[in-house]
Image (spheres, coloured by chain):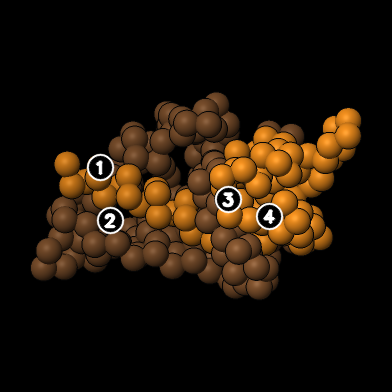
Chain colours: A orange, B brown
């Protein structure tokens, strides 16, 4: 998952490397992630490459959460400003 | 959809200092990250230019509703109005209220933004394009998402 999060496409071999998972297990996980739409599989020659797609996750976040976060940052700046 | 956001923050500064930071347009611009040239006046519209990194040059516009010294500062605006191609003026604005009161330690500030229930549905999704949290945040999102949807990753 961490490897995918850099937004670059990765092959199954790359994703399996350095893990204790088998190639089959990684493939299975990728299929699940692909089925919920957060990973896209693309063909590159003989290989399948997998890429992380954050769009559904972004949309799953509440609008008000983002507005609320923005206020936290803004008020943090106000606090610093008046307490200096 | 939830109608309002309420934020409370304790400021270690006298109420007069906080009021100045809210009501003086130059001071307001400093912490709100705005280049703001005209003073706030009740019943009038104030325009400014955003200086916040990533959104520099965008227009910021509010309509001043209330200015009660050391008590209440309120305006209406269009939240997240950051797409220069979109005309937000047809949408119902939200109301932002800064209420301040004196405490033993300084000043208690309560910010309330209300009227979100009147926002068009598509605006909820617009905000997501502004995502500036980068991949670290996405990673946390994915962890939460995966946990919530019972996707096994081991």
Nearest to the observer: residue B96 or residue B152 = B152
Q: Which mark is residue A22?
A: 4
Mark 1 packing: few (<14 Cα in 10 Å), some, or many (20+)?
some
Badge 1 or badge 3: first in the primary sequence = 3
Mark pair 3, 4: CA separation: 8 Å
Residue B99 seen from this side? yes
Chain hosting mark 2: B
Mark 1 or mark 2, whichever is nearer to me: 1
- Image coords of residue A58 (percent x, y): 65, 53
Q: Secondary structure at mark 3?
A: loop
Kindly identify which residue carries mark 3: A19
Q: Quadrant of residue B35?
A: top left
Q: Have a look at marks 1 and 2 and say if they share a chain.
A: no
**Residue at screen point 57% across, 64% down:** B144
Q: Are marks 1 and 2 in contact (CB under 8 Å)?
A: no
Q: Have a look at marks 2 and 4 and say if they share a chain.
A: no
Nearest to the observer: residue A47 or residue A31 = A47
Kindly identify which residue carries mark 2: B69
């Amino acid at each position: 998952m961490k490897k995918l999060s850099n937004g670059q496409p990765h092959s199954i071999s790359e994703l399996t490397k350095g893990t204790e998972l088998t190639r089959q297990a990684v493939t299975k996980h990728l299929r699940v992630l692909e089925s919920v739409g957060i990973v896209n599989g693309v063909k590159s020659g003989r290989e399948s490459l997998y890429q992380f797609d954050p769009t559904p996750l972004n949309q799953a976040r509440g609008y008000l959460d983002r507005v609320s976060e923005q206020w936290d940052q803004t008020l943090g700046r106000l606090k610093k400003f008046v307490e200096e | 959809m939830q109608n309002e956001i309420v934020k409370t923050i304790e400021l270690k500064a006298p109420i007069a200092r906080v009021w100045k930071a809210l009501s003086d347009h130059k001071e307001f611009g400093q912490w709100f990250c705005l280049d703001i040239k005209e003073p706030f006046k009740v019943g009038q519209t104030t325009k400014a230019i955003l200086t916040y990194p990533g959104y520099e040059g965008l227009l910021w516009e509010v309509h001043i509703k209330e200015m009660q010294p050391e008590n209440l500062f309120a305006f209406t605006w269009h939240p997240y109005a950051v797409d220069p191609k979109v005309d937000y003026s047809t949408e119902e604005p939200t109301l932002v209220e800064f209420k301040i009161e004196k405490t033993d330690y300084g000043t208690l500030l309560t910010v309330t933004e209300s009227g979100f229930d009147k926002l068009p549905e598509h605006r909820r999704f617009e905000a997501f394009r502004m995502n500036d949290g980068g991949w670290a945040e996405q990673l946390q999102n994915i962890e939460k998402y995966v946990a919530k949807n019972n996707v096994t990753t081991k």
